[in-house]
Amino acid sequence: MADLYRENILEHYQNPSNFGTIDAPDITYEDTNPLCGDRIRIDLRIADGKIAEIKFSGRGCAISQASASILTELVDGEDLDAVRELSAQDILDELAIPISPARVKCALLGLKVLKAGAYGITDWPETE
Amino acid sequence: MTHQTQSQHTFDSERVRADFPILGRTARGKRLAYLDSAASTQKPQQVIDAINSFYSESNANVHRGVYELSERSTELYDQARGTIARLINAPDKRQCIFVRNTTEAINLVANSWGRENLKAGDTIVLTMLEHHSNIVPWQVIAQQVGAKIEYVDIDDAGRLRMDQFREILGTGSVKVVAVTQVSNTLGTITPLKEITSLAHQAGAIVVADAAQSVPHMQVDVQNLNVDFLAFSGHKMVGPMGIGVLYGRRDLLEAMPPYQTGGSMIREVHLDHTTWADLPEKFEAGTPSVADAVGIAVAADYLSEIGFAGIREHEITLTNYALGQLREIPGMTLFGPDGEDRAGVVSFLIDGAHPHDIASILDGEGVAVRAGHHCAQPLMRRLDVTATARASFYIYNTEEDVDQLVSAVETVNSIFGRRAS
């Protein structure tokens, strides 16, 4: 289990990047993981087709919160069209920890919220 | 069976463990400490063998054939019903309906008794301790007939507010009280006999969710004087897919069928059908005979160990666990302290989400449940999103508790003490 809770995961959990909300965001979206009550909201400011600012807020387990924190670092400043292509595997690779099937939904909640908010993709990741 | 010489107060959990083959395996490479019996119990070899033996030696459909195998299968099914009736001291085995699980039993009552007896303006009383299975069926029927639902709150210790219960009964509109005998989340043992007595005085019937009580303590439906009582096989060392609804005879006889089709009929005509007598009226379709045999063997297994000994063992383990967990920094423990607590310990650790707790415990071979325990209203009442829960049964030992406590200390070393 030391593998799952490596230092960088705990660091992101306890000191998350881009944590908070944006006043008058261009995009805001929130979703929960109904099985465990994890909740993540993502606010975006868009400029020239790029993510000019991203903030997330919410509560939940270390995996969901650290994953969202890492996601915001990953996509901040990036082109919206490029971010659209991010896959579940990209996130799991970025986390670089062994995620058991029961915890995959925790790990992907941030990207799920981002995809739904930014692109209206609400059936992700089931269709992938 | 291996427990015939054991007295009620000296049962040997190591001998019990030897009956449960799964406990010999490892989990994540560690000794398995199975502490999730409130979700589902493990099965002793006796139950596994009984199911195997049914399919190997006695399998045929019931109530149909005149041939030897069908006769044998029917006889085993009837005997199983008799065993279950003795387990809960039902006056007549025909008052014990085999269903799939507690959920189906409660749905049966809500749909059949409820549709026939509830009307607009009536009140259904539930409690904040209920599992979703004793909430949702009542919400659906309440919406259909225009009845309303009142919830009995809990106090800070997790006990039912009986003063409030009396107040609600005083309105005079209560027709049914659906209440758990043991909270699956807090372990609270509710005063079911007192609840039944008060409800009856107010002209209401009582439906008891006994999923967490029948496996752990002597439940006597006549002494409790309940009108309906529901429990599941898989939580009492029996198979999944079988449960029991006990009902008062006059109520069951007056109720319409829940599901219709084969087995539950007396005569079928082109334009109408008459119903079979109890219990067949409520058992449409081919029943799970092997699982009925399995739950009966499970009932005998528990009875031979003795419920007084089971209860005492669980109290000892629970107190042993509470004593150690209480010493851990950042620990929050839920549920009442006292005689009215079953072997269920819900807890939280500062700075660690219950799912992270459960994942870390899993890595140490400790199986606990983390989440809302199918009791979201209770979670909101406690102002938490989830808890971690350890639950104890006959095969658990102090070694399991030690493994739990040590794993919880690991949680703290990862999360608790480095919080910023």
Image (cartoon, helix red, strand yellow):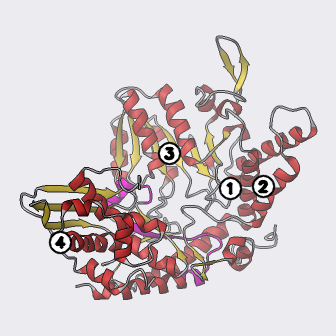
Which numbered mark, 1 or 3, is in the foreground of this view?
1
In which chain is the residue bearing label 2? B
**Amino acid type at mark 1:** Pro
Which numbered mark, 4 or 1, is in the foreground of this view?
4
In primary-sequence order, the first of circles 1 and 3 is: 3
Quarter of the figure with residue A19: bottom left
Q: Magenta part of the protein: which range?
A: B373-401
Tags 4 and 1 both on a single chain: no
Residue that mark 4 sits on: A19
Residue that mark 2 sits on: B51
Which numbered mark, 4 or 3, is in the foreground of this view?
4
CA separation in Å, label 4 and label 3: 52 Å
Residue that mark 1 sits on: B239
Which numbered mark, 4 or 2, is in the foreground of this view?
4
Was residue B391 drawn as part of the magenta stretch in this picture? yes
| CB atoms of marks 2 and 1 within 8 Å | yes
| CB atoms of marks 1 and 3 within 8 Å | no
Camera-side residue of B339 and A99: A99
Tags 4 and 2 both on a single chain: no
**Amino acid type at mark 4:** Phe
Counting labels gives 4
Residue that mark 3 sits on: B196
Q: Can residue B385 be seen in this view?
A: no
In primary-sequence order, the first of circles 2 and 1 is: 2
Tags 2 and 1 both on a single chain: yes
In primary-sequence order, the first of circles 3 and 2 is: 2
